[in-house]
Amino acid sequence: MTKSSLSYPIILLSRLVVSYGQVLTVLCCPQALESNFDRFVEVGRVVLLKAGPQAGHIAVIAEVIDHNRAIIDGPTTGVPRQSFPYRHLTLTPLKVKALPRNAGTGTVKKYVEKEGIVEKWDSSAWAKKRAATEKRRTLNDFERFQVLLLKKARRDRVRKVVKSSKA
């Protein structure tokens, strides 16, 4: 046996013969293993912008430039077509299916509207939570006081229902 075969014994067993003559292929390289990760940087992936003037808006990856940047376009959300670094993007679970590579703004808009990406995003729990957080940030002092009173009233109602159900 050679030195390399001792270091990687699983590579030598690339196929196992199972009973009944079936062949089971052994996955011997990490690239072939099934991944739990399902959000990849790819053409058509919907992204949330974390920085810049359009922070908080969504856009679509129109083309991958290199391992640091992609061309994004958000014709329905007010994001102009531009090169954007990945470190300022957050990948969402949404994806525009069958978007051609390097599609122009008109094509991206057509595909986004056809699949209802903006409506899907607005109805997602992630977008609703971001909207609620933004709403809480913009409350003034009196509105925060009203929220405090409403929470206090809700707490009292819950306490009374629990007390009556125990009795």
Image: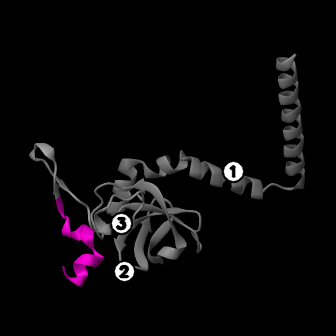
Q: What amino acid is labelled 2 in the image?
A: Asp
Answer yes or no: do the residues labelled 1 and 2 have beta carbons within 8 Å? no
In the displayed structure, 153 sits above or below 141; it is above
Side (left or right) of 38 relative to 167: left
Q: Viewer-proximal residue, 130 or 6?
A: 6
**Dot 2 alpha-carbon crowd within 10 angstroms: few under 14, some 14 to 19, many 20 or more:** few
Mark 1 = which residue? 132
Q: Viewer-proximal residue, 68 or 19?
A: 19
Q: Main secondary structure of the magenta part?
A: helix
Residue 103 visible, this angle: no
Residue 162: which quarter of the image? top right
* Badge 1 element: helix
Side (left or right) of 24 relative to 105: left
Mark 2 = which residue? 66
Residue 164: which quarter of the image? top right
Quadrant of the image containing the C terminus = top right
Residue 12 is a magenta residue: yes
Q: How far, Cα to Cα, is label 1 from label 2?
A: 35 Å
**Circle nearer the N terminus (1, 3):** 3
Quadrant of the image containing the N terminus = bottom left
Mark 3 = which residue? 42
Q: Where is residue 158 in the image (x, y as percent from the top left)?
A: 83, 29
User: Magenta residues, as a range?
Assistant: 1-15
Answer yes or no: do the residues labelled 1 and 3 have beta carbons within 8 Å? no
In the displayed structure, 143 sits above or below 42; it is above
Residue 135 is a magenta residue: no
